[in-house]
Amino acid sequence: MHAEIISVGTEITTGASLDTNSQWLSLELAAIGISVSFHTTVADDLAALVGVIRTAADRCEVIILTGGLGPTLDDLTRQALADVLGVELVLDPASLEFIRGLFQRFKREMPERNVVQAHFPRGTEPIPNLRGTAPGIWANIPRAAGGTCLFAALPGVPSEMKRMFAKEVVPRLPAGNRVIRRARLNCFGVGESQAEEMLGDLTARGRDPEIGITVHEATITLRIVAHGDTAETCDSKIAAAKSAIRERMGDLIFGEEDEELQHVVARLLANLGSTLATVEIGTGGLLARRITEVPDYERVYRGGIVAVSLEALVHTVGSSVGANKQTTIVAALESCRERLGGEFAVFVGAFPHFDPDNAAEASPTSEVALVGPNVSRVVDYTFLGDAALNRSRAGKIALNLLRLHFQRS
């Protein structure tokens, strides 16, 4: 059984809004064994929407549509579905009463225009929406090749859509004939092409489980998708894939699912009863912000210093100027450790100005460092791409130095 997800809204096709509903729905459908074959985005255009629904119905057994159920003139989902079915819109008194009740509960007068939200294509079924004024629509659309396509139209508002899908739509959907399970392993320290080379045949097309590679701000995510007749079969495939990946990628792997480097480092610090301080010049406090997003970060984080230059940092902490830049950085970090009370300290250096679009200009470098008991390390960092990406990568390199120190010592 295959599904298509349709997202309706000119604000999406123009790029003014981001479609997060399709991603969420794809994962939820996979969890019940229904594979998503198509994501379609369509503007608020009646003819285009009618064509998209007809095409989807002929190539998939399930359609989940989000958006276009509001009260305004550009909300066209109701009419588009009526045109596809060849029927007229009719008022559903129960839905209208519910919508009026919502406005009364919030002590507001209902605009007459909202009455349109209680109209449905004849022969379809309203889907209750307990969190908003836009009921959904459940329908069976005849297919050109015979049979019908199951169709659900849901509001575009994520909080309304998610509840309606889970409570009202999933119980109406037949269970898929295959179970689909997903898992993620997160890596840091290599590029996408190098990761693919290390994984070799594990990323081959048509393999089960499928292993894909995505990259976000220098973090490599390996996405494992397993298909099987039972959840146990899928889990066994995923476990075997994880074992094979870990054998090839080693300590480049730092976490699973939603874990970021700061979560892993904070956990390692907590397990060892240790603490951390941060010193930043080029990142403007980004590193400290990431650490403070970790639950209970106060257990391991002793604070940070954000400076505008190495000279300003030396002046602030009263450390000495060494024989070279590296020794000056280490001395400043030692002073920061003492001032802030962190057993370890990580450092991100200054960000020189450069034009990433100028191929003739050599890529500049800066420093990332780690100091602590039995460790004093300064590494060069070469700038690639835009400034925002460099700030993120540099902060991750600093955290990764500490992670690797713990795992290798």
Image (cartoon, helix red, strand yellow):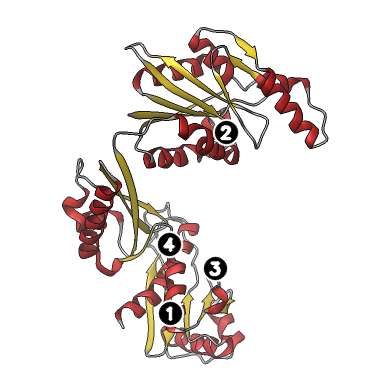
The residue under label 1 is 271
Inspect the image, locate mark 1, and give the three-letter code of the amino acid beneath it: Asn
The x and y percentages for residue 263 are: 46, 68
Q: Which mark is residue 156?
A: 2
The numbered dot on residue 295 is 3
Q: Are marks 3 and 2 in contact (CB under 8 Å)?
A: no
Q: Residue at x 43, y 90 (%)?
A: 323
First in residue order: circle 1 vs circle 4: 4
Q: Amino acid at mark 3?
A: Pro
Separation (CA) of disc 4 from disc 2: 28 Å
Task: Give the mark, 4 or 3, whose residue is nearer the N terminus.
Answer: 4
User: Which residue is tagged 4?
Assistant: 259
Q: Quadrant of the N terminus?
A: top left
Local SS, label 2: loop
Q: How crowded is the residue under tag 1: few (<14 C-alpha within 10 Å), some, or many (20+)?
A: few
Q: Is residue 354 above or below residue 72?
A: below
